[in-house]
Amino acid sequence: MNTSTRKRAGFSTEAIHAGQEPDPTTGAITTPIYQTSTYVQEGLGKHKGFEYARTQNPTRIALEKNVAVLERGTRGFAFGSGMAATSAITHLLKSGDHVVASNNMYGGTYRLFEQVTRGFGVDFSYVDTSNLEATAALFRPSTRLLFVETPTNPSMIISDLRGLAKLARARGALLAVDNTFMTPYFQRPLELGAHLVVHSTTKYLNGHSDMVGGIVISNDDAASERLQFLQNAVGAVPGPFDCWLVLRGVKTLGVRMDRHESNARAIAAWLSKHPKLTRVLYPGLPDHPGHALHKSQATGFGGMIAFETGSIERGAAVLQRTKIFALAESLGGVESLISHPASMTHASVPKIEREKVGLTDGLVRISVGIEDLEDLQADLEHALCVL
Ligand code: P1T
């Protein structure tokens, strides 16, 4: 479908069609899984634009074009995991460069920065990026990258994307935003001034908890050129079947996100009135400190909620009693999950750093799925009885 010659199509129309022409050989409406490692060439230097599958794969290219359109970027680069995608962004840096990053983000991202990238001579400073002044104060002449999540995993802290983009641009740094929690259905950081968006496609974009992948979307020509080189040179590419699964998942992203959100809004409102819970973190709650800011830069609040149970023992008791909410890492699938960030997803973040952002031992995180609301609420009600 040619979406460039007329008024922009709606989100779900683009999600279903962008980058996915009918297969030129058969007319297959669904992009085929090009399960091949190489392509036969007609003669030396004579080929159809496909040489070797690390470099080019039609299923991967369809996915990259599709998500680039949804995020309003110019190029997309798919990777074998969300961490491989973030790590490609770190490969844009060189020894002596400095990065400013959110002091709360997925624990694996912190681990990559501290235990891998730092070893190559890149320096990192962490800050509450919801505080623009504090963030600006950390910039140095060598700062090349500002890396943020909003809302953050799992403390749901909201940062001002327009303000951060202005700051990064004024200082000659790239702004990269991990948009995994929001997806382009609710938030499009590139429209607000960011240069790069990264996703764990493992989560909402695929949406069915049946693959691991990542993608970087860029609207910066120099970064795109380098990312294309890095994707091939470093080689952390996804297989075609996993790309196909994400392409299929993205077709229903809009309807899934609406349902994740309506379930989450109802559950967060109900949890916030629960007499045994002291803190419920969900940007859709009117008393969330980032509520108004989030509303000014996103069209929805998503499906992730965290709440404070008071201690690791109380948290563990809740986690053990749910039947529909499955105790597992990950998020963004159709099925509801429950987890304990301090010991699971954020175990590699030092306790002192965790506590600075309210990531206590008693914090429990839920990824609200698209099951029936009454069943999810009853499951949590039964689990919270233990408190
Ligand atoms: O797991 P992987 O596909 O490599 O993605 C890493 C990643 C990146 N960014 C965010 C915001 C994430 O939440 C993740 C992975 N997160 C989990 C596994 C989790 O349970 O939080």
Image (spheres, rainbow, N blue to C red):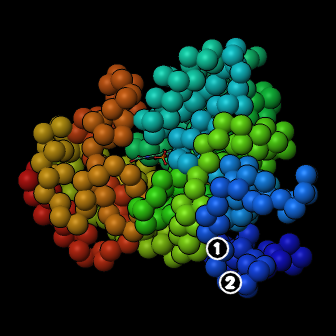
Asked where in the image residue 16 lies, by quadrant, the reply is: bottom right
Count residues near mark 2 (Cα–Cα under 10 Å), then give few for <14, some for 14-19, many for 20+.
few
* Left or right for 57, reference 50: left
Q: CA distance from mark 1 to mark 2?
A: 8 Å
Q: Which residue is mark 1?
A: 32
Viewer-proximal residue, 305 or 147? 147
* Left or right for 369, reference 32: left
Picture residue at 27% right of the left edge, 43% below the top: 340
Picture residue at 65% right of the left edge, 66% below the top: 34
* Left or right for 333, reference 290: left
Quadrant position of the N terminus in the picture: bottom right
Give x and y (percent) for residue 307: 29, 48
Picture residue at 71% right of the left edge, 37% below the top: 233
Helix, strand or loop under label 2: loop
**Count of all numbered marks drawn on residues in the image:** 2
Viewer-proximal residue, 171 or 2? 2
Viewer-proximal residue, 60 or 273? 60
Viewer-proximal residue, 46 or 295? 46
Label 2 beta carbon less than 8 Å to ligand 1: no
Helix, strand or loop under label 1: loop
Amino acid type indicated by mark 2:
Ala
Give x and y (percent) for residue 364: 27, 47
Amino acid type indicated by mark 1:
Pro
- One can see residue 125 in this view: no
User: Where 242 falls versus 238 (above or below)?
Assistant: below
* Left or right for 204, reference 357: right
Picture residue at 70% right of the left edge, 14% below the top: 96
- One can see residue 23 in this view: yes
Q: Which residue is mark 2?
A: 28
Give x and y (percent) for residue 53: 69, 54
User: Where 156 falls versus 264 (above or below)?
Assistant: above
